[in-house]
Image (cartoon, helix red, strand yellow):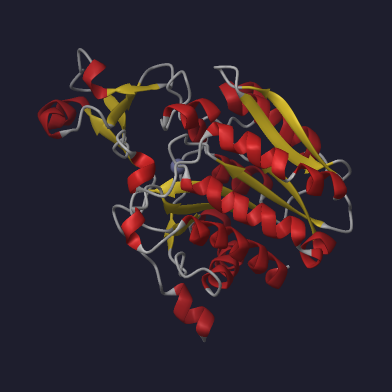
Amino acid sequence: MKKILLSLLIVFNSNAVCVHEYDIQGHTLLSQLHTLNEKTTFYQKENGTFEEVSYLKNIHPHKSYRIQETQPHIKKDYDDRYIKYYQYQRVIEFLSEIGPSLEQLDYKTEVIGKSLENRNLYSIFPKTLDRSKQVILMFARHHGDEGTANWIVEGFLKKALASKKFNDKFQIVLYPMINPDGAQAKRRYNKKGRDLNRSWGSTPSKSYDEIKTIQNHLNKVLLSKTKPIIALDMHGSFTEDFIYRVSKSFAGKDFFNLQQEFISSLSERDQWQAGQYNVSNGHKKMSRILLVRDFNINSLTHESIRDIPLTRNRTLQHLEDQGRAIVDTLIALY
Ligand SMILES: [Zn+2]
């Protein structure tokens, strides 16, 4: 009964997103241009990158434009007003802090390549895949400005690495910061203006920039050998915590129920997620959609609020606890 009740907790809130994305005809765009925020509204260029809408000259009335309305960039005194922003530097420190545990559990921490601005792209993965264990795949920070996601990843890793129960059952493949240049600049996009969660091709040769490196590595260490039991892509949304999943028609009823199991079980341990989800079949070049469609992997996007005011009775500790809740959920479910 509990499961049924939880499955009714569908939240369709227009702010329950990490970006507002839509296609618009040129003539409509022309008539609405004055209502759009020039600093937070981006259009997609012919080459697939995004640029501020204020640079858009010569709008063709009969052409369709892909628009992304992003969250405002809070520049001033961020860390005094919001839960501390998770910087690129922090991921380097954190990986060094947990280095000994990773080594002891036979994980490799590797710089698998560089971002466009020459920052490290990291992966943590098992030196050897243990066939008696399930693999958990996790990504964070496709979108540079969604810092809270990384605090949740820290909580997840700290708990996972310290839990015998977890390590007896699972191995982790993790890409902790996919877009370090965006993270450094507090920007959704990579250096070129690409949305890296719209940059996964069916093969790495068809993917873009940092994703090419990550996808090549992922194929080599994991997908060419075995399938993870679940994939979680960690993001930050405007105002809600929730999970993105695919519709029943996208991958069938059993798959829908499989995704529900995780969402329901997590809700018992995470008061912020609380069973909330959005159904979205996303974008064909999104990591979550690629993994569901091409690999039939239970792939979900985990969204927590991106900018959390310090007055909101929610702390960095709560974010880490959300990561711990994921560990407990996985142990309970699989
Ligand atoms: Zn995002």
Q: Quadrant of the C terminus?
A: bottom right
Q: Residue furthest top?
A: 58
Residue 89 or residue 122, whichever sits in front: 89
**Position above or below: 310 against 120:** below
In the rendered image, residue 315, in percent from the top left (x then y), is placed at 44, 58
In the rendered image, residue 183, in percent from the top left (x then y), is placed at 48, 32
> In the rendered view, does 185 fall on the left or right side of 214?
left
> In the rendered view, does 221 fall on the left or right side of 42?
right
> In the rendered view, does 280 fall on the left or right side of 92?
left
Residue 250 or residue 197, whichever sits in front: 197
Count the numbered circles shown: 0
Question: Residue drawn 39% across and 43% down?
Answer: 79
Q: Residue furthest bottom?
A: 1
**Position above or below: 274 against 215:** below
Indicate the quadrant where residue 221 lies. Answer: top right
Question: Residue drawn 89% across and 43% down?
Answer: 128
| Figure quarter occupied by ligand 1 | top left
Indicate the quadrant where residue 115 lies. Answer: top right
In the rendered image, residue 83, in percent from the top left (x then y), is placed at 42, 50
In the rendered image, residue 274, in percent from the top left (x then y), is placed at 45, 69
Question: Residue drawn 47% across and 76% down?
Answer: 6
**Position above or below: 259 against 122:** below
Q: Is residue 234 visible?
A: no
Q: Is residue 283 visible?
A: yes
Question: Residue drawn 72% across and 28% down?
Answer: 111
